Amino acid sequence: MMKPAQVVRALSALAQPTRLAVYRLLVERGPEGVPAGHVAEKLQVSPATLSFHFKTLSHAGLIESRQEGRFIYYAANFSVMNGMVAYLTENCCGGNQAACDVPQKKC
């Protein structure tokens, strides 16, 4: 279970439009991640600015990186994301899980 300070750090990192867009893109791409250049191109963000945002997301534990040749790949840290959601919904609806169910939006 995540600690409150960890959740606050993660939510703070996401409380900026570019970082939120980066994170959503990485979540969409899955655990294999994407090269930094792809993220910069897709979101039309300069590499220097993107580096700053990657650093903030990384310090919050929300993303991970790996080097493959001359490319750096970034991916969402799904265990931290799931831990944050679990923390936020731990006592949802006073423990009545059925009352907390939200219909899923169809793609």
Image (cartoon, rainbow, N blue to C red):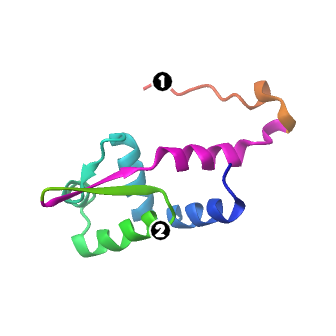
Query: Which quarter of the rendering shows the C terminus?
Result: top left
The kind of residue tagged 2 is His
User: What is the x, y in percent for residue 60?
Assistant: 51, 64
Q: Is residue 18 left or right of residue 93?
A: left
At a point 39% along the width and 70% down the height, the residue shown is: 55
Q: Which mark is residue 106?
A: 1
User: What is the x, y in percent for residue 4?
Assistant: 71, 61
Label 1 residue SS: loop
Q: Taking 46 as reference, is 74 above or below it?
A: above
Is residue 83 magenta-colored? Answer: yes
At a point 43% along the width and 64% down the height, the residue shown is: 58
The kind of residue tagged 1 is Lys
Of 11 and 77, the residue lying toward us = 77
Q: Taking 68 as reference, is 19 above or below it?
A: below
Of 53 and 59, the residue lying toward us = 59
Which residue range is magenta in the image? 70-93
Is residue 45 magenta-colored? Answer: no
- First in residue order: circle 1 vs circle 2: 2
At a point 72% along the width and 42% down the height, the residue shown is: 89
At a point 42% along the width and 63% down the height, the residue shown is: 19
Q: Is residue 14 left or right of residue 30?
A: right
What residue is pinned by disc 2?
Answer: 59
Q: Callout 1: 10 Å neighbours few (<14), some, many (20+)?
A: few
Label 2 residue SS: helix
Q: Is residue 38 left or right of residue 94?
A: left
Q: CA distance from mark 1 to mark 2?
A: 33 Å
Q: Taking 1 as reference, is 97 above or below it?
A: above
